[in-house]
Amino acid sequence: MGTQIAQILSSNAQFAQKLAAEEEAAAGGFLGSLLKLGLSSVSKGGPFAPGGTFSSAVPTTTSGGSSAKNAAISAATQAAVTAAISSSDFKENFVPAGPYLEQMAKLDIGMWNYKPELGDPDTHIGPMAEDFQRLFGVGDGRHIRFIDVLGVLMKTVKELNAELIELRRKVEG
């Protein structure tokens, strides 16, 4: 069981690193913000590779390439696989979201696999980034951030709960 979990985490970390490499140019935006917070891995293969470790120190150079590139990839891996920065201390321009229930009903969820060059042969279930951006107004149409998925799901659950409460009120009333 432990070996399977390590393999899954390693696979997820490798995939996140490949996605982060696309966005690494100039280490700006989200990755740059993570670097400013000092988030990076110091071990070859990232924090979730077998034997990998995570540290707040920015590395020199790990498995090839510039230290900024490796730090950006490692920071993105850490953020993508574990937790999103979500404190109100890091946020601004907060406005209520939704409603999303009708958009969620329109979101196609399918089974698919990544193209071979991405190195992830497994079958997955989920939406397409283009559809997610079109329906919910977040994302770049190429990637779906887990924090956005969680937010949409939480808001949709709240909307379903409100409908359930209203139906119960009508039935019992």
Image (cartoon, grey):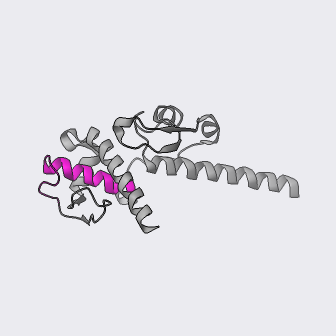
The residue that appears at 36% across and 42% down in the rendered structure is 119
Residue 69 belongs to magenta span:
yes
Residue 5 belongs to magenta span:
no
Can residue 25 be seen?
A: yes
Please state if 146 lies on the left or on the right of 172 as rendered.
Answer: left
Give x and y (percent) for residue 19: 33, 42
Can residue 91 be seen?
A: no
What is the number of callouts on the image? 0
Q: Which segment did they paint magenta?
A: 58-86
Give x and y (percent) for residue 32: 23, 48
The residue that appears at 21% across and 61% down in the rendered structure is 43
The residue that appears at 34% across and 48% down in the rendered structure is 16
Which residue is at the front of the view, 2 or 43? 2
Residue farthest toward the bottom in the current orientation of the protein: 2
In the depicted structure, whether residue 24 falls above or below residue 60:
above
Quarter in which the C terminus is drawn: bottom right
Give x and y (percent) for residue 68: 16, 49
Q: Quadrant of residue 18?
A: top left
Please state if 112 lies on the left or on the right of 3 as rendered.
Answer: right
